[in-house]
Image: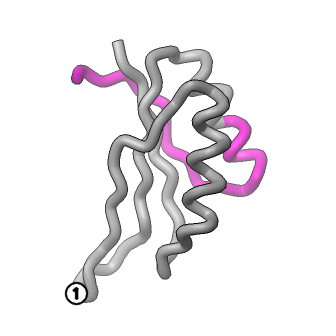
Amino acid sequence: MTFMFEVYYKPPPDPARESALTQRVAAFGGHLDCREVPDDREIGGICLTYEFDDEELASNAASLLRGLGEHVEGPVDYAE
């Protein structure tokens, strides 16, 4: 089973922020699975989807990011 959560933040894209988030997530065994950026005609935020093999590690990573002030939705399980 695979687990994921999404991190949302307001534009503009911030490569340094995304790199720091991805490094923190990697310490828990997660990896960036999808990155969504609204185009010029869309309203919305940047969405980073991180995937994990372990639910507890996903929860721990999500808690850490929330503690750092990030908007995190999940984790949830999903089929590949």
> Mark 1: which amino acid?
Arg
Residue 39 position in % (x across, y down): 26, 79
Which residue is depicted at the point 51% across and 52% down?
Answer: 7
Which residue is depicted at the point 56% across and 25% down?
Answer: 29
Quarter occupied by the C terminus: top left
Judging depth in this view, the residue of 35 and 59 nearest the camera is 35
**Above-or-below relation of 12 to 66:** below
Residue 41, by quadrant, is bottom left
Which residue is depicted at the point 46% across and 25% down?
Answer: 52
Answer left or right for 14 relative to 31. right
Residues drawn in magenta: 63-80
Q: Secondary structure at mark 1?
A: loop
Where does label 1 land, which residue? 41
Answer left or right for 26 relative to 35. right
**Above-or-below relation of 1 to 71:** above
Residue 45 position in % (x across, y down): 42, 70
Residue 72 position in % (x across, y down): 56, 47
Answer left or right for 65 relative to 76. right
Judging depth in this view, the residue of 15 and 61 nearest the camera is 15
